[in-house]
Image: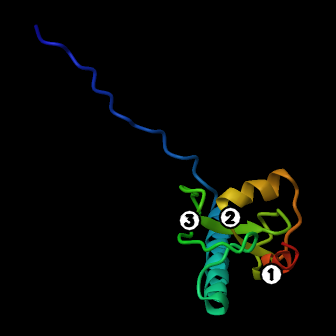
Amino acid sequence: MTKMGSKRTLNPKPLKPTSKKTTLRNKEWRKIVLERAEYLIGKYGFIVCEYSGESIQTLSSMGEDINDGWGHHIDRDRNHCTPENCYIVKYKWHRDIDDHNIVVSQEDFETRKLFL
């Protein structure tokens, strides 16, 4: 007796295509995030989470790991892509910042360290 196995082929639907405007905005944001990361490396010797002061090993816009980091828009406006609005943060803190409406500023972990 031969058992017929069901072999499923995953054919995921492609992600919803993004508009040219969104694609350009995301490209610009990526450049700003990488420039901010370079600045932090120059100042601290590593990419620092500007919320916790922890080291970030991987920058990833996809957030595959909660310890990955990426840029957070300080004013929460995704269309406001400027260096002054970029805050590098680990994904595990990014959600807390958004969920609890925490006001942040660049390198604010330096001030927080004084009160710990």
* Quadrant placement of the C terminus: bottom right
Q: Which residue is mark 3?
A: 60
Q: Name the mark nearer the viewer: 3 or 2.
A: 3
Q: Residue furthest left?
A: 1
Alpha carbons under labels 3 and 2: distance apart = 21 Å
- Local packing at callout 2 (Cα closer than 10 Å; few below 14, some 14-19, many 20+) is few
Q: Which residue is mark 1?
A: 110
Q: Which residue is mark 2?
A: 21
* Front residue (pair 78, 73): 73
* Front residue (pair 77, 60): 60
Q: Residue at x 74, y 66 (%)?
A: 72
Residue 77 percent location from the top left of the image:
82, 63
Q: Name the mark nearer the viewer: 2 or 1.
A: 1
- Residue 67 falls left or right of residue 13: right
Pointer 3 with pointer 2, Cβ within 8 A: no
Amino acid at dot 3: Ser
Residue 6 percent location from the top left of the image:
28, 21
Q: Residue at x 78, y 67 (%)?
A: 73
Alpha carbons under labels 2 and 1: distance apart = 36 Å
| Residue 59 picture quarter | bottom right
Q: Residue at x 72, y 60 (%)?
A: 93
Pointer 2 with pointer 1, Cβ within 8 A: no
